[in-house]
Image: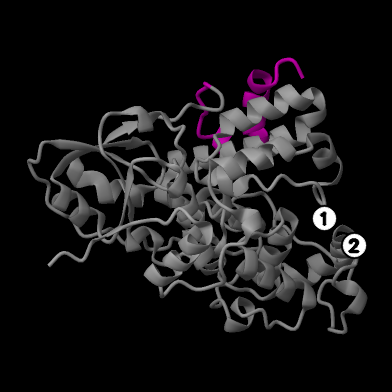
Amino acid sequence: MSSAQKLNIPSDRVERLHYIRRIFSAAKGPDLEVEWSGGRASGVRKLNAIDAIQYGRNRNFINGAVTHLSPYLRHGCLTLNEVFAFVKKQSGVQAEKLLMELAWRDFWRQVWFAEGNAIFSEMEPPKVDIQYQPLSDSVKQANTGLPCMDGFVKELLDTGYLHNHARMWFASYVVHHLKMDWREAADWFEAHLLDGDFASNHLSWQWIASTFSSKPYYFNKENLERYTGGKYCATCSAQCPFDASYEALNARLFTPSIATNPKQYTIKSLPMKAAHRFQANAIYIHDEMLSAHNALMDKPYPKIFVFDPVLYGNWSLNRLQFVADCLHEMMNVEVWMGDTHEVFMQKGVGQVVTQDTPNLTVKEILAPFAPRWQPMEKLVNVRLSEKRLKRFSRYWEKVSPLLMPDI
């Protein structure tokens, strides 16, 4: 008997939240907040509300004018190209900081396309000695005793979002102070983010750890207190591990690495599944193309999205609800839960057409269905060498004259 189940996503938002909570009863966390409702319409509203000039002035502050666009970019509700063009037209040279941050997203993704599953192992030997202690329950349950770090975890678990500066502080604390395994921490972190993106997330953790950068990232109390406005420090009675000069922290935290080779983590391949000779075509909708404006939505084939546990089995509840919001906006998409291979066999699908992705797990799942990969429009049409993709500065040196010739 088939275990695949076709879903009927309710049009009413409250009903939709309840429905997803019931269907994915094992998913953890609270419901998706209204502020983070998924879909292109919500993404466009946030895009129209951004202030690129203010962003450039105060983006590093926890209460700064950040855009909150990342979940909508991650899931394809908005494209990187349209956001870049919108910001550039709206604010020109005064938007350079925001435009550069958008380019970081392209950089991470280009590295993932080039390196594949290598991004889940250390890209380079660490520049300082790092260790690989298991990620503790005290971290995952916001019980470290440090109000700042526990506050960051609570915000992540409650909302699915965390300011980029807080992400950097938290990752540095976990990797360099607690000496925990960056990869285990990155996996856990990504699963709870509404904007969870393997390239941006895992490569950022490696940047912190110094396995994809020339030095480790660390911070002190003065830095944290300044950019949080004293939100945590003012009432903190804990013994602060960050209350020292950068020189003192450097001496305390770091010794030169003795590793000559980057650590490799095992990536398990999926079981091979049989190909077949069905004739029907279908558009496979994956989680990077959740917009009715996607060009493949115009193709005259059935459109199918599958909540496959291989891809979504560890996602938090609010992230699944975000995807359901997106799918609700997309007309004529069949939504299923279960094994993708089983769904396509049941539908008699022989070939799928879908948007290209650097996610090799998606490619493994679709391999039996002779997939045709439609390329995404590039942020900039230029070939990037392996050397350019080693550091953002080298990437930016190449692409910035083409992206912003008039800035």
Residue depicted at x 84% and y 65%: 220
Residue 174, image quadrant: bottom right
Q: What is the x, y in percent for residue 12?
A: 49, 56
Front one among 95 and 256:
95
Front one among 297 and 68:
297
Q: Which mark is first along the chain, 2 or 1? A: 1
Residue 242, image quadrant: bottom right
Specify whether residue 397 is in view. Answer: no
Instruction: Report the side of 364 relative to 34 (left or right).
Output: left
Instruction: Report the side of 352 relative to 151 (left or right).
Output: left
The residue tagged 2 is: 229
Residue placed farthest to the front in the image? Answer: 12
Q: Classify 161 as above or below 146.
A: above
Q: Classify 215 as above or below 57.
A: below
Local secondary structure at mark 1: loop
Local secondary structure at mark 2: loop
Residue depicted at x 81% and y 50%: 60
- Quarter the N terminus occupies: bottom left
* Label 2 crowd bin: few (<14), some (14–19), many (20+), radius 10 Å: some
Q: Does 51 appear in magenta? A: no
Q: Classify 381 as above or below 363.
A: above
Q: Residue type at mark 2: give it.
A: Gly
Residue depicted at x 15% and y 52%: 346
Q: What is the x, y in percent for residue 381?
A: 52, 21
Q: Are marks 1 and 2 in contact (CB under 8 Å)?
A: yes
- Quarter the C terminus occupies: top right
Residue placed farthest to the left in the image? Answer: 277
User: What range of the chain is rendered magenta?
Assistant: 381-407
Residue depicted at x 46% and y 56%: 120
Residue placed farthest to the top in the image? Answer: 406
Q: Which mark is residue 63?
A: 1
